[in-house]
Amino acid sequence: MKKEIKLTKKSFCGYILILLGLLLLTSPLVLRFYHDMVAQSEKKAFEKIEASKSEDEIKEENKKAETYNEQIKKNDLNVEDPFTTDDYKNKYQMFRSTNTPFAYLSIPKLDKYLPLYLDATYEHISKGVAQVAGTSIPIGGKGTRSAIAGHRGWWGDTMFLYVDELESGDYIYIERAKETMRYVVSDKEVIGPYDWSKLAPRGDLDMITLLTCSPFLPPRPNRLLVNAVRDESGPADEFKLPSGEYVASENDSKAGDSIVKITKFFTFIGAIGGILAIIYTGQRFAKRLKAGFYKKTESL
């Protein structure tokens, strides 16, 4: 007959610590897998909302964004680092709310689809990516440059973790108001956290800049800029694959990169393995608790 091991206070605490450790390790992997699964459906829900907007609503929103962009052109570049500023507050009086996505940022090579908010507050960059106040709102236009901030990975989502994998010629898309704008990666650079002169517009170019922390591994004292220039060679819809996804780059029609695919595979395996480990450990813990409870009641 198999001998039941007594559940001591030490082993009780051990089980609790093991379960907590497994939860802490597994939860981010499960959330990452979940976010990857629902990203496309959330993007489609946003597209439906945008498609339901009237022409007058779109014109009004564009006019407000154009007014904002003209205002910042007349002033010196005034940007605060969204990753280090504790009390990051900016006023967007002309917009009713900045707490709903203004657009969607799509990076096919990285298989990332992220809601894009106005104003890079702590709350906004914890839910997606956001336009940095003091830079242009991403609606296109000559002499505009929108800095779009995103975490280098966030609890439960990869966010901009692999943006340094983007290379010259890769496509980035911004979708909103029944229109898709396509940008082509031109260059990358690493700057200090307060070297904001590097975000100034480049002549009459229509640009966006993905902004995140650098290097890849912490600590990350610097900032990585991935610069992209508007491509107006044709409607963005012409660059869709049969699956409905957009082309990843000028030279490659396959969306997704090997590193991204490998990461997603191991995220899935890790999530499943972690869940099974939690279930197994929980069952053993419950069994020993139950055995200890019966022994205690028998001795009464």
Image (tube, helix red, strand yellow):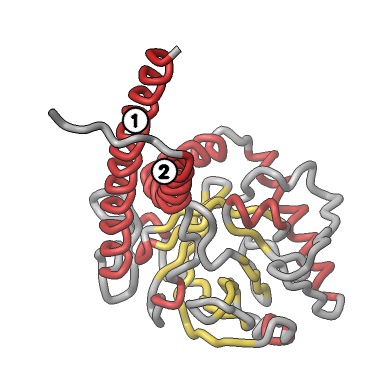
Question: Given contact means CB atoms under 8 Å apart, are the residues at marks 2 and 1 in contact?
Answer: yes
Residue located 39% across and 35% down the image: 7
Q: How many marks?
A: 2
Q: Is residue 70 above or below residue 226?
A: above
Q: Which mark is residue 11?
A: 2
Residue 27 appears anywhere in the view: no
Residue type (three-letter) at the residue carrying disc 1: Arg
Whole-percent x, y for residue 16 in the image = 47, 42
Q: Which residue is mark 1?
A: 288
Q: Which residue is at a point 41% across and 76% down the rendered structure image?
A: 166
Left or right: residue 72 compared with residue 231: right
Sequence-wise, the earlier of marks 2 and 1 is 2
The residue at 79%/47% (across/down) is 95
- Residue 88 is situated, as x and y percent measured from the top left of the image, at 80, 61
On the image, the x and y values in percent for residue 237 come to 38, 55
Q: Residue at x 78, y 74 (%)?
A: 79
**Left or right: residue 56 compared with residue 47:** right
Image quadrant holding the C terminus, namely top left
Judged from the image, the secondary structure of the residue bearing numbered disc 1 is helix
Relative to residue 77, is residue 111 depicted above or below? above
Between 256 and 237, the one nearer to me in the picture = 256
Q: Quadrant of the N terminus?
A: top left
